[in-house]
Amino acid sequence: MGILSGKKALIVGVASKHSIAYGIAESFAREGAEMAFTYQNEKLQSRVEKFAAQWGSELTFPCDVASDEQIDQVFEELGKHWDNIDIIIHAVGYAPAHELDGNYVDVTTREGFRTAHDISSYSFVALAKGARKMMHEGSSLLTLSYLGAERVLQNYNVMGLAKASLEANVRYMAASLGKEGIRVNGISAGPIKTLAASGIKSFRRMLSENARQAPLRRNVTTEEVGNAAAFLSSDMASGITGEILYVDGGFNITGMAEMEV
Ligand SMILES: NC(=O)c1ccc[n+]([C@@H]2O[C@H](COP(=O)([O-])OP(=O)(O)OC[C@H]3O[C@@H](n4cnc5c(N)ncnc54)[C@H](O)[C@@H]3O)[C@@H](O)[C@H]2O)c1
């Protein structure tokens, strides 16, 4: 029996086989979770339906997280199939490409700032609001962050601010929902080549620097993030809330990496 057997999980953020949410779903399937999925738009619908079927699920719903109506609709539809939700995975992030290419002060705009924070941070609490009636003691919410929330990484720009907001969101949501026995956590993942990541100008360099400087001397996989997500979403982590867990090969602890000889 897996650590998630009997759990019902809504996964938001599958776009491709390379998505972190895909790695999470693989791990969740192996650990016995029952899953439902959302897709951002019609373009992704058939792909997400195919992935869902591969994990034995017929529950897929459209959801652009910029729309409160679509979020409400997801839970209304899901409520016809499930009485409650044990787990929500929020693996969504977005900033317009021109914000992620160039000198921060020069390229950042009011509109880009608003969009990045709306889609990448507000949407997490929006999902919690939508799911409120279906969540219960023992439910768990999990989001995905990045080191750019705390440190400056070239070209990450306004996404760094949005991730800082998202991590604060984790803490405020944990405090807000803790009295109901609902846990809220985040995983700060190391760089992984996904669709979202390819929008960042210097992403290839982020990958190579991470692999060179991280104590494990390599990058992490979506499978490794998925396994950490399974743990944090399971009852094994029942004492953990408001936490950001690094799954980055240890990169975040490094001050100065060893010199190559
Ligand atoms: N790839 C990395 O290096 C890395 C590292 C740390 C954290 N993260 C975070 O992981 C999360 C998942 O990203 P990923 O790297 O798997 O990339 P991805 O492109 O596979 O996934 C991003 C997802 O966000 C969804 N999305 C974007 N705008 C949306 C909207 N308006 N409504 C609904 N969905 C929307 C996309 O459809 C997609 O499914 C993001 O929050 C990202 O910032 C990624």
Image (cartoon, rainbow, N blue to C red):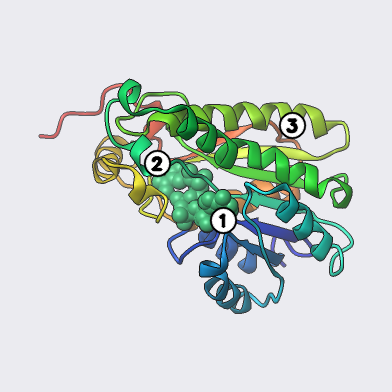
The residue indicated by pointer 2 is 249
The residue indicated by pointer 3 is 174
Q: Is residue 23 left or right of residue 193?
A: right
Q: In the image, what residue type sits under mark 3?
A: Ala
Distance from label 3 to label 2 (Cα)?
26 Å
Q: Which residue is more in the foreground, 37 or 241?
A: 37
- The circle on residue 47 is none
Q: Earlier in the sequence, mark 1 or mark 3?
A: 1
Q: In the image, what residue type sits under mark 1?
A: Gly
Helix, strand or loop at label 1? It is loop
Measured as percent of width and height from the top left, residue 177 is found at: 81, 34
Measured as percent of width and height from the top left, residue 143 is found at: 60, 43
Q: In the picture shown, does residue 259 fall above or below 221?
A: above
Viewer-side label of 2, 1: 1
The residue indicated by pointer 1 is 13
The total of numbered circles placed on residues is 3
Q: Which residue is more in the foreground, 2 or 102?
A: 102
Question: Which residue, as the protein is rendered here, is positioned at the far left?
Answer: 261
Can the viewer see residue 188 in this picture? yes
On the rendered image, what quadrant is the N terminus found in?
Answer: bottom right
User: Ligand 1 within 8 A of label 1's CB?
Assistant: yes
Q: In the picture shown, does residue 150 fall above or below 95?
A: above
Measured as percent of width and height from the top left, residue 80 is found at: 87, 68
Q: In the image, what residue type sits under mark 2?
A: Gly
User: Ligand 1 within 8 A of label 2's CB?
Assistant: no
Contact (Cβ within 8 Å) of mark 3 with mark 2: no
Can the viewer see residue 224 in this picture? no
User: Ligand 1 within 8 A of label 3's CB?
Assistant: no
Helix, strand or loop at label 3? It is helix
Q: Residue at x 72, y 47 (%)?
A: 68
